Image (cartoon, helix red, strand yellow):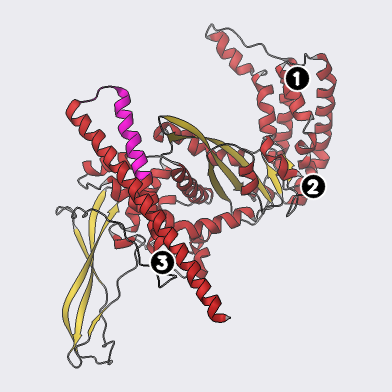
Amino acid sequence: MDADRAALTEEVASLRAELAIARAKASEDMALIAQQKLRIAKLEHQIYGQRSERSARLIDQLALTFEELEASATQDELAAEQAVAKTTAVAGFTRKRPDRTTFPDHLPRERVVIDPPTTCECCGSHRLRKLGEDVTRTLETQPRQWKVIETVREKFTCRDCEKISQAPAPFHVIARGWAGASLLAMIMFEKFGQHQPLNRQAERYALEGVPIALSTMADAVGSVCKALDPLLRLVEAHVMAAERLHGDDTTVPVLAKGKTDTGRCWVYVRDDEPFGGAGPPAAMFYYSRDRRGEHPQAHLAAYAGILQADAYDGYNRLYLADRKPGPIREAACWVHARRPFFAMADLEENARRKSAGKREIPLSPIAIEVVRRIDALFEIERSINGKTIAERLAARRTLSAPLVEDLRAYMSAHLPKLARGHDLAKAINYMLKRWAAFTLFLEDGRVCLSNNAAERGLRGIALGRKSWLFCGSDRGGQRAAAMYSLIVTAKMNDVDPQAWLADILSRIASHPAHRLDDLLPWNWLAKRPAPEAKAA
C-alpha cells in the first residue's frame, strides 16, 4: 500500500513538473517573440525615422510588453526548477540567455575575500595550500556611485590527501548573482515605487556609464518578485487578520491587442492606530481585469469583521447574514457621502469664480447645512483619534449620536420638497438608504468615519498612471499589486522602502524560513542594527 502511494506521489510530482516546464517554455517563447518585435520596431525607427508620435509610443508599448513577458518567463522558470526538484524522473529546464555583457572596466572593484577553510574537509588536516580561487562579480550600486564587488573564494589543497577545500559560494537573491541587493532594490523601487518603467531606467543607467540590457533588468524583476513572495503571503495574512479593513479600488489601464483595456487594482488596508490597536499598519493589493463582484468576494473569502468601503454592489454578498466564515459588517464612508453635498456648498470656489469673472455655481442652503453638520462630526472624531475603543464609543454616544439623529431628521424633512431627480435628493437618498452602515460607528469604537486610509493607499497608483501609462499584461498587473503591497506597507510603517528592500534582499536567501517575520517592515525597523558612529 505504501509503495503504491509513493508511486502515485512520484507520478503526480512528475506531471506537475512537466506542466511547469511546459509553461516555462511557453513563457520563454512569448518573451523571445516580444523581444524580436521590439528589435524590429527599433531598427525600422533607425532606418525610416519617426513617422508619427504614435510610432514612438508603439516602441514604448513593445518595450513594456517585453519586460513583462521576460519577468513572467523567469518566474515560470524558477517555478519549474522547484517542481523538478521534487521528482527524479523529469529533466530540469534552464532558459537560453544571451551572453551577458562584461562589467565595464572603468568601474571600481571592491575585493571581498571570504575566510578560507583552516582544515581539510576530508581528513581534518591543517596542512592546506592555496590551489586557486573562484571570483563572483556582482554589480552593485551606491547613490550616484557604481562599483563591481568581486567576491573571492580561495581554493586550498591538502598536502596529505590532495583534497581541495574551498569556502561555499554566497547566497544570491537572483540566479548567478549579477546584481547586488542595493541595485535590485533600486530597480524595484524605481519601477513600482517611483513609477519609472525599466526602459527609462536603462536609458539613465547607460548615461551614467553602466549599460544594462532591458532583458537583464526584466529578468531580475521576475526573480525578485519570486523571492519576495513568502513575505507577501505574511503581509496578506496580517492584513486579513484585522478586526476592521478599509477597502477601495481604482482603474488600471492594461495593454491589449490594438487597444488598452481597463483593469482594476484593489486595496485592503489594516490601520488599527485610530482606535489604539496594537497591530502595525499594512496594505494588501490585488489586480483584476474587470470590476466584477466576484473579485472582492474572493479576496475576502476567509475574512470576517468590519469592512469600511463605498457602496459598490459587488460587496453586497459579503454582508449576507448566512455567509461563511461569518458576515462582514458594512461601515460606510462619511467623506464619500459628503462630496456631492460639498459640490453644492463650496463657497470658496464660488468666490474664486466670481473674482475671475466666471459664472457662479448655484449653491444650496440645504447642502451647506448638511456639510456643516457632517463637519461637526469630524471635529469630534479628531478629538478622540487614537484613544481606546471604549473611550471613542463613550464620546460618540454622548457627543455624536444627538448630531447624527438631528442630521437624519433634517434630511428626511427636506427630501419631500426636492424633485426626485435632483442631485441633492440623490445625495440624501444615498445616505438614508444606507443609514445602518453610516451609523455603525455609534455602535463600534473601531469604526472610522472615513475610508481615507484606503484612498491614501491608492494615491500612488493614481499619480503613477501618468508616468507608466498602462500595465503591459495581466501578469504585470499582478506583479505590480504584489510590489505595491510591500512598498506601501513599508511606507505606512515609516520605513524607507528602498533601504528595507536592499537589506532583506541581501538576507532573505539565507534567512531561516521560520523567522521570516523578522523581515517584515515593522519588525525590521525595531531589530535593524543601529548605524555606527562616524569618526570625529
Determine whether 448 is above or below 424 in the image.
below
Q: Is residue 285 magenta?
A: no
Q: Secondary structure at mark 1?
A: helix
Q: Mark 3 or mark 2: which is in front? A: 3
Expressed as whole percent of the image width and height from the top left, the position of residue 291 reads 59, 36
Q: Is residue 54 magenta?
A: yes
- Residue for point 80% across, 44% down: 443
Give the mark count: 3
The quadrant holding residue 368 is top right
Q: The magenta stretch spans which residues?
A: 49-68
Q: Is residue 242 left or right of residue 395?
A: left
Q: Which residue is mark 3?
A: 84
Expressed as whole percent of the image width and height from the top left, the position of residue 289 reads 52, 39
Tell me the distance, in whole angstroms, between the alpha carbons under discs 1 and 2: 30 Å
Q: Is residue 497 left or right of residue 200?
A: right
The quadrant holding residue 339 is top right
Q: Which residue is mark 1?
A: 425
Tell me the distance, in whole angstroms, between the alpha carbons under discs 3 and 2: 45 Å
Q: Secondary structure at mark 2?
A: loop
Q: Is residue 439 left or right of residue 27?
A: right
In which quadrant will I find the C terminus? bottom left
Front residue of 23/35: it is 23
Q: Secondary structure at mark 3?
A: helix
Mark 1: give few (<14), some (14-19) or many (20+) Cα within 10 Å.
some
The quadrant holding residue 511 is bottom left
Q: Which residue is mark 2?
A: 321
Q: Mark 1 or mark 2: which is in front? A: 2
- Residue for point 58% across, 7% down: 359
